[in-house]
Amino acid sequence: MVCQSNSLDDVKKQAEIIAVLIDTIQIKLKDPALVWELIDLLPVILQSIKSCTQNDISKLDMVHNLYSILYLVEPIQFDRYISSTPDTCWTMLYDLLYVLNSLLSTSNTYPDNWLTLTMFQYSTVKKVIIQVSKYLLKKLNSAQTWGQLDLDLWSIFFTLSNTYFKLKGLALEHFSEAKQKTIKSRYGDMRNDLIVTIQRMWESLEKHQIKLLPTVIGPFLELMLINQPNLKQLGINLYYQLLRCEYKEYKSFKKVETETINTLDQITNTEAADILDEKFRIYFSTNLEEKMNLDSLIKEPGKIFIKDMTMFLELLFALRTLPDRPEFEDDRTIAAMQLMAYLKQTDRQDTYIKYVHLLCNQHLSNNNYTEAGNTLMLHADLLHWSDSPMEELSFVDGFRAQTQRERKERLFKLAIEYLDKGKAWERAITLMKQLIVQYEEVLFDYQKLADILQQQSTFYRKVIGVERFFSEYFKVGYFGRGFDQAIQGKEFIYKGFELERMSDFVQRINAKFPNATLLTYTETPPPEITGSSGQYLQIYAVKPAPSEPKQPNTIATNTAATTGTGKSMPIQVQKYRQHNNINTFIYSKPFKKSKQQAADGSTSSSSGNNEFGDLWITNYHFVIQDTFPTIHRRSEIVRRYEINLSPIDNAVNTVSGKNSELMEMCNKHEHGNESNISPFTMVLKGVIDAAVNGGVNMYKQVFFSKQYLEENKDKLDSVEKLKTSLTSQVQILKRCLSIHSKVCSQEMGGLQEQLEIQFEKMKSELDI
């Protein structure tokens, strides 16, 4: 390895010559003339170190020479050098601070077990910081203006100081008791030696403090994270003074707030994330509040600031401490949403947008494409279709400086791409309609218009031509005081993964709570469960339900969905609507009761021993906080209610539900493109067998009898609906049998013939 500006041999020779000079000076007891020669070499040494690669041996020699010179130089000699080079000394000082910071930040100059040399290095850097502080103060007091060089010098000065405070080699609090004693007896805690200097330097800046905000806010917060009382106090003092400076100048904490949030967010992405704990939050808020309460200038606005920062820390910590494992995906999503809601509420848009994209990426990594598309629209919704310029998004790839319209268009296209992958074509088409308006009526970009219309056409074809397996939904209750407060005693509806079975979902939740007991019943758990110290899970499947019925005892499932023109709605569209834009779910449980117990008199003596006549259904409705699909896959149940479905209404639902299933099979197989017809055959056989083996007669015996009609006049509408549903079933079965005869193999000819015979028997038995 060689240096970029000097050859390896040159640097080696330089290092050797300087080393000889240093040895000579030490022998001659720091001869001032020779020391002066060495000081004059500092710019050359610094340039050589900066230009060499990290592991270059010649660089290590130069670094050792640098520390040796700085150790040998007396303050008065350094003063003389600064005075004699007024035009170049500030550049040299900047380079010196920069190089020292780089050396301390990267890797150890000396091995960890070389204690004496390591402490020699640290004491030398401390000496330089104190010496340079005097020059900076003198320049500050004599200068009429504040320029870029001043900003650079003060920035690197505080950066080096913070690096020094964070050195692991000086973190006595982490050493063994024996090592602490050894170092303290010889060197003391060298970090304490700089506290007064740094405090004085910061106070001297006064109104210039705010100019250093982006540079110093991180270091000040990091000081509070060091487990050393004096450094923690220094951090809170400097941070408080920065707050006061901004408020005095601008009557606001906006800049400090923004930088604080950005810095804390960055810290949580590093190895130091685990120290942003409850202790830090308490220390930060308590000590800052104590100072602000004594300051009439910022006492009142300070209360709001502390409250906001404490809330942000709690939400940030809740998000960052969750394990990065699949079973905790929902928890991470909810935590991110809570943080995003806070950021949006407090008008911290940049950080809010950052977390929108982080959540989007999380969904993409888990193949939750629909949720990813919906999440991305949170960013798009902040923008307008305007040509106002926007800066580049540094934290998101692909978002250069552009207009609001261009950025919103890009977000729409990305969301459409993700929704396509998630098979949410209806939602994607809705977004396309907005782009079509822009291309056709605003931009007159007919090429883009043609492209988007072609894509829209493809999506419409996918809606009617591609089979979709919609997610199942599951109700999960967390009972017992063993759960975290965030979920303890609460119940949620989860959106399962595509084709995820109940057993797979239960296994997924159990993996998260391996010590929890799974309850095997669906009733509300008793107090001995809910109040216990353990963990109890209650999990069962639920179905999407229509919005809350206006009156009780209404039929839950329509016999046929229609469009505004009265025409039948395609089954694919029906299924999509049944599983999307929903916030109510239902769990149905059958029960029987006698005529005397019937609330509406539906069960009568006409039922006899017919099970259909006394088959009641309790529908448990659960209303959730959000509407699926959204940006997450778990939503808390906020309301519940029950509706008892009478036997006649239950019969209508049963028949109409089977009609929908038959219609779906017809549509799926009518073009002969489906190779596997076994499910079609089984459904047909099941419906016809059930009808022939007494199903239809049971309905007739109970609900069409003269006695039932006389005793249940309030149910005449439901009786007519049942007749209509049974009549429709006959027509649907006729169509299904026709399609089945065309797609079944010759070997199934006998079965086809048997089904047709049984179908004719079914029609004759119905006779309605």
Image (cartoon, rainbow, N blue to C red):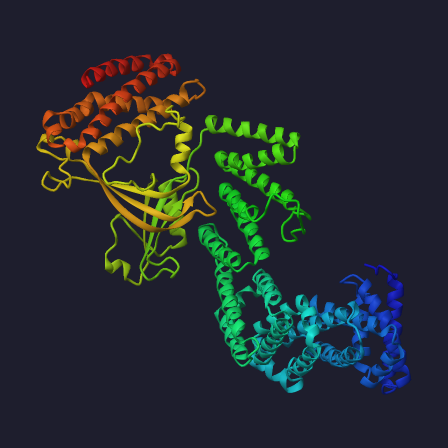
The quarter of the rendered structure image containing the C terminus is top left
Which sits in the foreground, 1 or 361? 361
Place of residue 403 in the rendered image (x, y in percent of width and height, measured from the top left)? 66, 46
**In the image, residue 457 above or below residue 184:** above
Place of residue 229 in the rendered image (x, y in percent of width and height, measured from the top left)? 56, 80
| Residue 664 lies in quadrant | top left
Which sits in the foreground, 35 or 316? 316
Which sits in the foreground, 9 or 222? 222
Asked whether residue 611 is in view, the answer is: no
The answer to whether 108 appears left or right of 739 in the picture is right
The quarter of the rendered structure image containing the N terminus is bottom right
Place of residue 541 in the rendered image (x, y in percent of width and height, measured from the top left)? 33, 42
Q: Residue at x 35, y 43 (%)?
A: 584
Place of residue 554 in the rendered image (x, y in percent of width and height, measured from the top left)? 25, 36
The answer to whether 593 appears left or right of 98 in the picture is left
**In the image, residue 707 above or below residue 412:** above
**In the image, residue 184 above or below residue 565:** below
Which sits in the foreground, 697 or 713? 713
| Residue 121 lies in quadrant | bottom right
The answer to whether 117 appears left or right of 277 in the picture is right
